[in-house]
Image: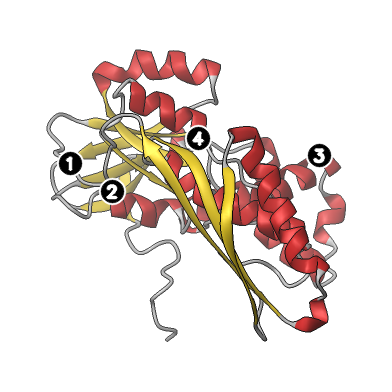
C-alpha cells in the first residue's frame, strides 16, 4: 500500500488494515487477527509506531479483530506491513471458474478513490480547482481514497448464500481487475458504459477537471470495493441483500471468448490495458 508523505500515521495504519480486510472480504472470510510490522526513522519519534497501531486498531476493533504481535525496526524509509488471518465460512469464490451461462458483473461503486488521490495531490501542490468543489464532495472523494471501507459483511453474506461465482477487489483499476477475473479461463468481459455508477461527487470533480469519470472508474485504483460475477438466477437474492448492506450495481457480463471491452452506444472499446501494473517497467 502506498501513501502520500504528509499522511498522518493513524490514517496510514487505518488504511493499511482496511486494504488487507478488503482482501479477506473478497474471499468471503471472517477476519480474526493480524500482525503489524513498522519500519521508521528515529526522526519520527517513538510516538509514530504507536499512532500507526492506534489507526489499525480503530479499524480492527469494530470487527472483533485482534492485534497478535508484530515487529519494529529502524528504516530510512517508512514501511508498514500487515499480515492478516481469517477463516472462510463457506467455500470461497475464486477469480477462476466456468463461464457457462452469462454471468453479470456487480460492484458497489468505483472511481471515487482515484479522484480522491488526484484531489489530494492537487491540494498539496496548491491547485485551486478544489475551491470550486462543494465541501461535501471534497470530503467524500478524499475519504474514499484515505479511508476505504472494506466490504467484509457483504463478502460474508455473499459467501454464506453461495451467490457469487467469481470475485475480486479493485485495487489497481476496474478494467485491470476485470481482466484478472478472466485470466484463468477463456472469458470475455463486456462492461456497459451506461451502467457504470458515477456518484455526484465524482461527476462534479470530473466536470471541473474536464475529465471523463470513466477514466477514473476503469483506470484508477485504490477503491477496494467488491467486484464479483453471479448467475442471473441469483439476481433477486443479491438485490435483497444489497438493500440491507450496500448498493450493488450490475455493470456488464462475462461471456465465452477473450478480452475486456467497454460497450458504449453499440461500439466496443478494448480496455484490457487500462489500470495500474505494479511490475510494469517505465517506458
Residue at the (42%, 24%) spot, across then down: 157
Mark linked to residue 97 = 1
Residue at the (38%, 38%) spot, across then down: 87
Q: Can residue 206 be seen in this view?
A: no
Q: Distance between the residues labelled 2 and 3?
A: 34 Å
Q: Distance between the residues labelled 4 and 1?
A: 22 Å
Whether pointer 4 and pointer 2 mark residues with C-beta atoms closer than 8 Å, the reply is: no
Q: Label 2's element?
A: helix
Q: Would you name the residue on which mark 4 appears?
A: 152
Name the colour scheme: secondary structure
Residue 187: percent from the left, percent from the top?
18, 47
User: Against 99, is 4 above or below?
Assistant: below
Residue at the (81%, 59%) spot, across then down: 129
Residue 6: percent from the left, percent from the top?
78, 69
User: If you read the primary sequence from the N terminus, does the residue marked by circle 3 or circle 1 appear first?
Assistant: 1
Mark linked to residue 136 = 3
Q: In which quarter of the image is the N terminus?
A: bottom right
Graded by Cα atoms within 10 Å as few (under 14), some (14 to 19) or many (20 or more), the crowding at tag 4 reads: many
The front one of 237 and 48 is 48
User: If you read the primary sequence from the N terminus, does the residue marked by circle 2 or circle 3 appear first?
Assistant: 3
Q: Image quarter for residue 77?
A: bottom right
User: If you read the primary sequence from the N terminus, does the residue marked by circle 3 or circle 4 appear first?
Assistant: 3
User: If you read the primary sequence from the N terminus, does the residue marked by circle 4 or circle 1 appear first?
Assistant: 1
Q: Would you name the residue on which mark 2 appears?
A: 181
126 with respect to 102 (left or right): right
Residue 35: percent from the left, percent from the top?
54, 57
Q: Label 4's element?
A: helix
104 with respect to 19 (left or right): left
User: How many marks can you see?
Assistant: 4
Question: Which mark is in front, 3 or 1?
Answer: 1
Amino acid at each position: 500500500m502506498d501513501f502520500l508523505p504528509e499522511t498522518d500515521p493513524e490514517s496510514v495504519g487505518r488504511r493499511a488494515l482496511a486494504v488487507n480486510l478488503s482482501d479477506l472480504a473478497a474471499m468471503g472470510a471472517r477476519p480474526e487477527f493480524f500482525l503489524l510490522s513498522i519500519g521508521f526513522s528515529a526522526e519520527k519519534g517513538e510516538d509514530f509506531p504507536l499512532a500507526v497501531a492506534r489507526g489499525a486498531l480503530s479499524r480492527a476493533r469494530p470487527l472483533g479483530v485482534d492485534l497478535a504481535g508484530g515487529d519494529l525496526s529502524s528504516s530510512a524509509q517508512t514501511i508498514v506491513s500487515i499480515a492478516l488471518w481469517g477463516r472462510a465460512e463457506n467455500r470461497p469464490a475464486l477469480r477462476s471458474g466456468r463461464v457457462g451461462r452469462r454471468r453479470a458483473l456487480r460492484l458497489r461503486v468505483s472511481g471515487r478513490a482515484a479522484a480522491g488521490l488526484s484531489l489530494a495531490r492537487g491540494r498539496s501542490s496548491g491547485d485551486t480547482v478544489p475551491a470550486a468543489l462543494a465541501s461535501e464532495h471534497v470530503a467524500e472523494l478524499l475519504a474514499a481514497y484515505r479511508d476505504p471501507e472494506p466490504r467484509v459483511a457483504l463478502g460474508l453474506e455473499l459467501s454464506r448464500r453461495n451467490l457469487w461465482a467469481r470475485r475480486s477487489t479493485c485495487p489497481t483499476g476496474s478494467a485491470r481487475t476485470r481482466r484478472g477475473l478472466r485470466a484463468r479461463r477463456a472469458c470475455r468481459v463486456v462492461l456497459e458504459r451506461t451502467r457504470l455508477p458515477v456518484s455526484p461527487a465524482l461527476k462534479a470533480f470530473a466536470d471541473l477537471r474536464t475529465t471523463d469519470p470513466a477514466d477514473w472508474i476503469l483506470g484508477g485504483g485504490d477503491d477496494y470495493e467488491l467486484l464479483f460475477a453471479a448467475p442471473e438466477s441469483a439476481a433477486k437474492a443479491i438485490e435483497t441483500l444489497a438493500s440491507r448492506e450496500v448498493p450493488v450495481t450490475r455493470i456488464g457480463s462475462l461471456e465465452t471468448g477473450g478480452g475486456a471491452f467497454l460497450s458504449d452506444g453499440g461500439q466496443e472499446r478494448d480496455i484490457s490495458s487500462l489500470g495500474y501494473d505494479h511490475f510494469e517497467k517505465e517506458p
